[in-house]
Image: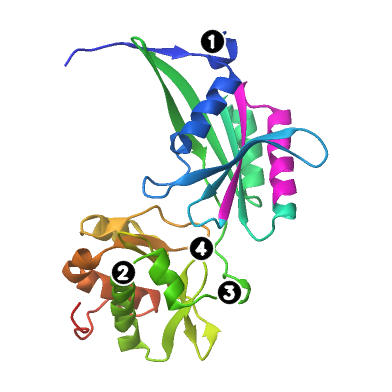
Amino acid sequence: MQYQPAKRIVLKSSAEYNEKWLQQQILADPSILGLTDGNETLEVKDAERRQPHAGRLDVLLQDEDRTTRYEVEIQLGETDESHIIRTLEYWDWERRRFPQYEHIAVIVAEKVSGRFLNVINLFNQAVPLIAVEMKAIKVGDIITLVSTKILDLNLPAKEEEDDTAQETDRAYWEQKSTKELLQLTDWTMGLVQTLDPALSLKYNKFYIGLQRNGLADNLLTFRPRKKYVMVEFRIPRSEELDAEIEASELELRDYDKKWGRYRVNVDTRTAKNEKDLLVSLIRRTMGLTPNPISEPEAL
């Protein structure tokens, strides 16, 4: 393997690679921003989106469940006051126009200096805000982009407003996912009901939650996909539990800081092999000691 030195390209002073070029790269592949883990796909909802009073939002992204939108503002060189204000204004306008979605403001710049990082961090206490430094690197004849999340979301967890969730039924989820994965959801729910028989599944448009006597009680939630079920456990984060899940066959996704949830991808094989760990996670979610419970019905 040969060594090839890399060269930093300052986009702001480049005649070839301008802000429009950077925007096109993000539109072609939103994952280069590093906003989510590698398992969750972001879709482009709009670009150069006209705002009610003035200006245009550079990029509007949404998650694959279409519950969260990202208002992305790009600036070459260092971020400054106008960049921060513009990003927050566009975020605020979008959330007022479309309150049915969660909205996250994203500042993208080649450099987020210490002074403005402090300012952004202050806003981050009250506004869902992410700051990304994006650098262009040239290696030989190839140019690439390297993103670093300088500031991540920093909002306390809060209760979901389940009374606003759009209810669906099992048939909806069997069409969206597969019957096999709905059976896996049932099997996992069997683990839950071993501890609390009063809980049952509640089918919503964007997730399958739990209910008790007809009222939402989302200790954990299910999001069946085509190849796996993403199960979310409401458990405070710890390095010990991180290591335990990472050492298992379960696929650990990014911790959901907003809702205070561990998120793991489960399929039929990993569920069978990691039953004891799933039971432990369920017990932790319920505030119990993570001890095994009786064997559920076989998958």
Of the numbered discs 4 and 3, the one sitting upstream in the chain is 3
Name which residue type carries label 1: Glu
Name which residue type carries label 2: Leu
Which residue bears the numbered disc 1?
16
Residue at screen point 75% across, 47% down: 93
Name which residue type carries label 3: Asp
Name which residue type carries label 4: Trp
Q: In this rendered view, identify the residue nearer to me: 25 or 133.
A: 25
Q: In this rendered view, identify the residue nearer to me: 86 or 206.
A: 206
The reply to whether the C-beta atoms of the residues labelled 1 and 3 are less than 8 Å apart is no
- Give how far apart the Cα atoms at labels 2 and 4 are: 24 Å
Indicate the quadrant containing the N terminus: top left, top right, bottom left or bottom right: top left
Residue at screen point 58% across, 16% down: 18
Of the numbered discs 3 and 2, the one sitting upstream in the chain is 3
Give the answer, above or below, for where 42 lies relative to 217: above
Q: Residues within 10 Å of mark 3 (few under 14, many from 20)?
A: some
Residues in magenta? 68-94
Of the numbered discs 2 and 4, the one sitting upstream in the chain is 2
Q: Residues within 10 Å of mark 2 (few under 14, many from 20)?
A: many
Q: Secondary structure at mark 4?
A: loop
Residue 91 highlighted magenta (yes or no): yes
Which residue bears the numbered disc 2?
181
Give the answer, above or below, for where 77 lies relative to 168: above
- Give how far apart the Cα atoms at labels 3 and 2 are: 23 Å
**Residue 50 placed where, x, y %?**
74, 37
- Give how far apart the Cα atoms at labels 4 and 3 are: 13 Å
Indicate the quadrant containing the C terminus: top left, top right, bottom left or bottom right: bottom left
Of the numbered discs 1 and 3, the one sitting upstream in the chain is 1
